[in-house]
Image (cartoon, helix red, strand yellow):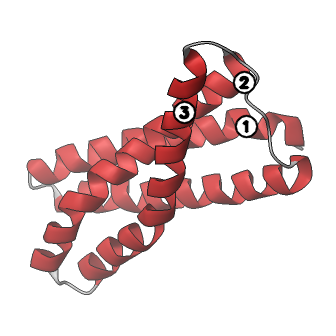
Amino acid sequence: MIAVSDLPALNAALNLLSAILLGTGYAYIRRKNIRAHKACMIAALATSTLFLTSYLIYHYNVGSVRFTKEGWIRPVYFFILVTHIVLAAAIVPLALTTIYRAWRGELWRHKRIARVTLPIWLYVSVTGVLVYWMLYRL
């Protein structure tokens, strides 16, 4: 059984895995490997869903975690955190819409929204790892 105190590290690992899957899926679609692209994107969605579940469980049990560092790193942390939170809220409907359009076979609409969704989803995944590192490891 995983302890609640281990969930932040798990969350960072899930965010990193999601970023890797997104990048790999993008590389596959650029090579016209639709099957591999689809597998990567479904895995990225599953990984992000596991992350969100784990994140909610952790914060339900622990509450808010304060950033205690001082100096130049403090405004950097809060800038990353605020942009991460805002874009994380936006990525849920964007990702679901993008995947829905692909599933429906509306590929031109899928491609159009994916150009917006992918960089935001990557940013959220990578900054999630950065927030973890700055909050728990720095």
Q: Residue at x 44, y 64 (%)?
A: 90
**Percent coordinates x, y for residue 107 in the rendering:** 14, 77
Q: Residue at x 73, y 37 (%)?
A: 8
Per the image, the residue denoted by label 1 is 8
Foreground of the two, 11 or 36: 11
Answer with left or right where residue 14 lies relative to residue 99: right
**Percent coordinates x, y for residue 78 in the rendering:** 57, 34
Q: Which mark is on residue 49? A: none
- Whether pointer 1 and pointer 2 mark residues with C-beta atoms closer than 8 Å, the reply is yes
**Percent coordinates x, y for residue 127 in the rendering:** 48, 37
Q: CA distance from mark 3 to mark 2?
A: 10 Å
On screen, 36 above or below 126? below
Quadrant housing the C terminus: top right
Answer with left or right where residue 62 lies relative to residue 26: right
Q: CA distance from mark 1 to mark 2?
A: 8 Å
Q: Residue furthest bottom?
A: 104
Answer with left or right where residue 78 lies relative to residue 135: left
Q: Which mark is on residue 136? A: 2
Per the image, the residue denoted by label 3 is 129
Label 1 sits on a secondary structure element that is helix
* Mark 1 burial class by Cα count in 10 Å: few <14, some 14-19, many 20+: many
- Whether pointer 3 and pointer 1 mark residues with C-beta atoms closer than 8 Å, the reply is no
- Whether pointer 3 and pointer 2 mark residues with C-beta atoms closer than 8 Å, the reply is no
Label 2 sits on a secondary structure element that is helix
Question: Who comes first in sequence, dot 1 or dot 2?
Answer: 1
Q: Of circles 1 and 2, which is in front?
A: 2
Q: Residue at x 17, y 84 (%)?
A: 106
Foreground of the two, 33 or 69: 69
